[in-house]
Amino acid sequence: MATQQAPKVLFVGSELSPFSKVGGLGDVVGSLPKALRQCGLDVRVVTPAWPGVLQKVRDAGHKITTSLQHVAVACAWQTAEATVHRIEVDDVPIWLLESNYYRGSMYPWELDVFTVRPFLVFCMQALELSKVTDWEPDIFHCHDWPTAYLPCALAWHRHYRGAVNRRGVRPASVLTLHNVAYQGAFPPGAFFEESGLDRSCFNMGGIEFYGLVNLLKGGIVSATAVTTVSPRYAWEIQTWESTQDLSGVIYSQRHKLDGILNGIDTDFWNPATDPLLPECYSADSLGGRQACRRELLKNTTFDPDWKGPLVVCVSRLVEQKGFDVILPALKQIPELGAKFIFLGSGHHWIEDALREASSLHRDSLCFFPGYNESLAHLLYAGGDIYLMPSLFEPCGLSQMIAMRYGAVPVVREVGGLVDTVTDVDAEGGGNGFTFLTYDTQGMLWSLRRAIERFSNARAWDKIRRRGMQEDFSWKKSALLYRDLYRRIL
Ligand code: ADP
């Protein structure tokens, strides 16, 4: 077919770094399109203009062009309109949809028929966008439950099912699973009357899961292809290894599932050019790293001349990130011969435990509550060991960033951490320290090995260098996405 050479792909993302990033999903929507365009694909992005987004775009100096035409869809017996703004960032065309539906906070705490409406409206507006833009995608690339409704609409919506584009071709859809723990599930109520989906899809082979509407499940079943963000996670989510409960559904759809490892934006995450560091450095010239370490120590309650290992952790403070195994270890920290720095926000019970431990062990544990981009860069650049004992980890970007900045990771062997970190004591050597069982003793075993190895400067330098020289860019993965797009058209 005519589009085989250069598929046109519309990324439909509920968040977009750096304007509306909440987590890794925003990073991917913000960086993968650029890499795909460098592979010759025509990839563009549509995202809601959540509160503050247009201001951030203006502050960053981007020129906004606003379309005279609105995009309009029907939802809950009303017309939902959006103003269409266009910007270009790093050569990627981006449409920002401004609507009354996107005036609240991004993700609701409680999901029900009312609170999911903005996401249904957004997906339908993405489907209608070509009427305003004169650019028609061959593929809609959706991300997690917030945009999983789009493939459902292409399969079961009374207006969109069977829709063809101007060339008479049915558009395809790709759904990327960034985190299967969040599924967009809620009681059906008046969902079918409001959304326009045919009620007959409320069954085991459709959008229903244990009596609830489950948008992620509907998307998995109805999308042309499903991807997830690492090969290991693609396997785990089909098996009993998964801590989430869609494994049976995902196993039944394995014929269309690919695990493609996330990359990081290596222009943004680059210690040789990072404007947020007091001094830049590279694998061949590590001098600047000492300045970063000094600056980091100055911000803590520790001795600024500390020469021993510095263990750092930048994380959402949630169960997923391994705090059930970290918190019981805090009382042993003074005996470990290292100093620990945590930066993060999330559950109050985790924040409280870290705060209490930092006041008890002022000399060995420091906790910075909150979200702080520049401090995060300083932790990656000044730390020696990066701690990430996740319960589950679809891909994980932090361990890749840490290695690129010269902090050696201590991770649990799960999900994308398996695909990116190899134990230094494995055959052929590795770039970090790993453990398998999800418990405090396992984590401490690996941490102690790392702390001990740190005292051998030559051995440590070799491990650190190996991590810094890994290729974590999008290059390889972008080619895998390109192959996938070509395959499904
Ligand atoms: P997840 O998306 O599950 O939170 P990832 O490791 O994939 O985990 O990505 C986390 C991203 O968010 C990284 O870029 C990390 O540096 C950043 N991050 C997490 N917590 C903070 C924080 N408190 N301050 C600054 N950046 C943070």
Image (cartoon, rainbow, N blue to C red):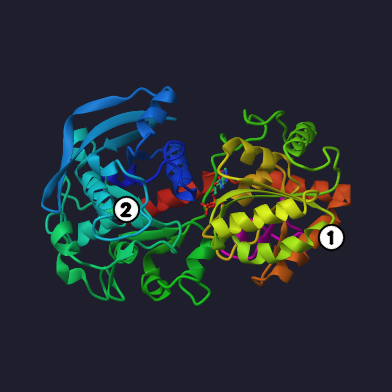
Residue at image coords 47%, 69%:
237
Q: Nearer the viewer, mark 2 or mark 1?
A: 1
Question: In front here: 180 or 232?
Answer: 180
Marker count (numbered): 2
Q: Secondary structure at mark 2?
A: helix
Q: Secondary structure at mark 1?
A: helix
Mark 2: amino acid: Thr
Please provide the residue range marked out in magenta.
408-430
Question: In front here: 183 or 164?
Answer: 183
Q: Would residue 113 be seen by someone viewing this image from the given angle?
A: yes
The residue that mark 2 highlights is 147
Report, in whole angstroms, how far the alpha carbon at label 2 lies from the one at label 1.
48 Å
The residue that mark 1 highlights is 335
In percent of width and height, residue 137 lies at 26, 43
Q: Earlier in the sequence, mark 2 or mark 1?
A: 2
Q: Hey, which quadrant is residue 52 in on the image?
A: top left
Question: In front here: 86 or 372?
Answer: 372
**In this rendering, position of residue 181 left or right of residue 289:** left
Q: Is residue 279 above or below residue 452?
A: above
Mark 1: amino acid: Glu
Q: Is residue 155 above or below residue 400?
A: below
In percent of width and height, residue 26 lies at 44, 45
Find out whether residue 296 is within the magenta segment. no
